[in-house]
Image (cartoon, coloured by chain):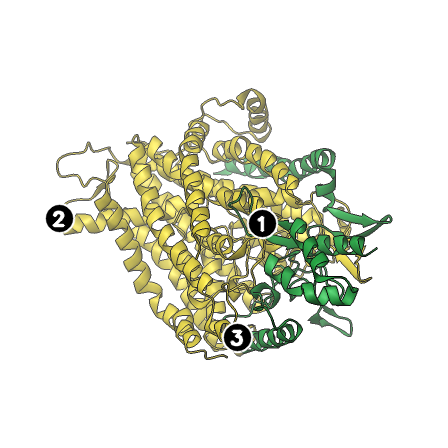
Chain colours: A yellow, B green
Amino acid sequence: MTAIGWFQIILYCAIVVALVKPLGWYMTRVFNGEATFLSPVLRPVERGFYWISGVDERREQHWLTYTVAMLLFHIGGFLIIYGVMRLQAMLPFNPADQAAVAPDLSFNTAVSFLTNTNWQNYGGESTVSYLVQMLGLTHQNFLSAATGIVLAVALIRGFARASVRTIGNFWVDITRCTLYILLPICIVYSLFLVSQGMPQTLGPYVDATTLEGAKQTIAVGPVASQVAIKMLGTNGGGFFNANAAHPFENPTALSNFVQMISIFAIGAAMTNVFGRMVGNQRQGWAILAVMGVLFIAGVSICYWSEANGTTALHALGLSGGNMEGKEVRFGIVASSLFAVVTTAASCGAVNAMHDSFTALGGMIPLINMQLGEIIVGGVGAGLYGMLLFVVLAIFVAGLMVGRTPEYVGKKIEAREVKMAMLAILVLPLMYLGWTAVAVVLPSAVASMANAGPHGFTEVLYAFTSATGNNGSAFAGLTGNTFFYNLTLASAMFVGRFFMIVPAMAIAGSLAQKKSVPPSAGTFPTTGGLFVGLVVGVILIIGGLTFFPALALGPIVEHLAMNANTLF
Amino acid sequence: MLREIRPAIVLLLLLTAVTGLAYPLAITAIAGVIFPSQAQGSLIEKDGKVIGSALIGQEFKEDKYFHGRPSATLAPDPNDSSKTVPAPYNAANSGGSNLGPTSKALNDRIKEDVEKLKAENPSQPVPIDLVTTSGSGLDPDISPEAALFQVPRVAKARNLPEQQVRQLVEPNTKGRFIGVLGEPRVNVLALNLALDGASK
């Protein structure tokens, strides 16, 4: 570990925190339907969209209608991706002549992008056409991100409103989110990325003759436009197989730094949107503080472990940390930081191969995802995931003092706690359940690339990443098999929607409740005690759920690594 | 609920057209005008022929060139398309080795490379980046230490004084961005082009 390394980490955190307030202010205006500096241009477009699609922007929806609208929207999105992938050979923008994608792989990919997971069982440059990258994947990067954000906003409205039955209009929210927030940022951002060296072309792959006379085919494409939203929307699906490790997908140290900031920007600002909407920004800062504590702890362990390297490397007289699977332009610190950021948020882009991380360095991304990606988290998804834990923590606090728990003026009762528990329990059921099935099926075990405990970690990581809608991988695992295509798709589906529906039910039930003014007996939720309590609840629930699985994977591997046992 | 079906179809198509077609095509058009070289992939031409990209590493095996890092990229086996064979710096199929910290295969590979490099230059410690594969398999850079490590071999193969070769490394070394971000590095292709220029 070096001083300049720590300085990069601190600088990163400072910039993310500095962006929280301005971005939170802007997003709150967008979702409150107020005018912004972009309104003169975008408002006519927005109204045109409502007129053509028959949306009455003043009509608000009950939580069930809101959720059904979201689900209908997703069915259509699924059909578009699946259709374009199956038919890509007959469609334009296919200069590399990619053949139709197999049904199970198309199914897996469609679910993967729909759920904001962007797990890649396909290799971008070797499997899909430019049309699939744009019409299938870039568009769903926008819409799945927008969906996450608007669902969080709907839940916030549940906390902020009193005695009403509606939580907003899904169609208005998704249109405004896409037009006013995601698209303008992406236009500026993607041009910046091109300036750093990211290709943006519809031309065919380039054939080069190297200095030594060998042939090299260089894959290019409309990369920058997709990468911008892939990062900003915490999607993470790479244009290329190697994702953000690929020099075209992350050309410079600066592009890397900005990409990391863009992963956290919206998710962190959502805490401020929450604070503003419930009428006290300190409520938002308290939640961000919970995230910050867990984040700093994760970064420190990961950076320390990667900078230390492995016993096997030391035995060969090598120093300088674990550089296997990492790029020289990023080095140890930017690779470790990126790994923690991408899994704390549900991004899943990688700028180094997590499979080649040290045992403990690779365990941190795994833990981040198993905690439910609530450390900033996916855009929107992180906040509603965190609010579920807050509900639980408040409930525990209420039990300790024997009072009905309240949070931002709302009584937390049996229904909310049951829904929060449903969402929190269903996730481990998916990743632990499917991992257990996979390790006893010989055909599934054959997909592991590494022997010993590391192979087990590969499988656990895959199902955790899919359930958490992250999409990063211990990429050695051969995921493009019938078994993994279907089971991972089911994990992604359950991980997304069994989180969303209970969260929306809580939103609906909270919106109907009366607001209780704070009294002397109200537990203050803006201070250090609250932050400590939520961190404690997260770690205890998390620890109880997945510690045994970690012990079989990364922990035993760490002990083996120190003893220089190889598999 | 029925009245949600029309927006589910129409709004989806509208937003898809905007984000999936209009946006990427507009960015392609704008980028092509203001950043034409980067948008095409930062290609390097020599005598009218493309010799590579400034951002994509390529394989160097000859002693007279600086070598990049090992690469774990694969290509389909020409004899059996269901299998893959090693194809270093295959820029149409990026990827890393994905071998973990307790992998015997990884350890054997690194050990073999370390021994080769020690034989080549016993006077300096072996730089870690010269014996580890990158995440993309296309890393265009090596560390400055890795470049200096190879100076004796390159100088000998070209019959140049070591000092002259070493002097080429420094102008081709890029520091951290604003002195803070990333790591110092040397672009192997740029260095080798400079080397070819100096040898003429």
Left or right side of A311 for A203 = right
- Where does the image place residue A220, in percent across and percent down from the top left? 71, 50
Residue A78 badge: 1
Query: What's the amino acid at mark 1?
Result: Phe
Q: Look at the numbered disc 1 and give the secondary structure of its residue.
A: helix
Q: Chain of mark 3?
A: A
Q: Earlier in the sequence, mark 3 or mark 1?
A: 1
* Res. A401 mark: 2
- The local secondary structure at tag 2 comes to helix
- Chain on which label 2 sits: A
Residue A28 vs residue A318, the one in the foreground: A318
Q: CA distance from mark 3 to mark 1?
A: 50 Å
Camera-near label (1 vs 2) is 2
Q: Alpha-carbon distance for marks 3 and 2?
A: 58 Å
Q: Please state the chain letter of the residue tagged with numbered disc 1 in the rendered image.
A: A
| Disc 2: CA contacts within 10 A as few (<14), some (14-19) or many (>=20) | few
The residue that label 3 is drawn on is A316
| SS assignment at label 3 | loop
Task: Give how far across and how far down residue A305 sits, in percent.
Answer: 42, 63
The quadrant of the rendering that contains the N terminus of chain A is bottom left
Name the N-terminal-most of marks 1 and 2: 1
Q: Nearer the viewer, residue A553 or A5?
A: A5
Residue density around tag 3, few if under 14, some if 14–19, many if 20 or more, within 10 Å: some
In the rendered image, which quarter is residue A480 located in? bottom right
The percent coordinates of residue A477 (x first, y second) are 55, 68
Type of amino acid under label 3 = Leu
Q: Earlier in the sequence, mark 3 or mark 2?
A: 3
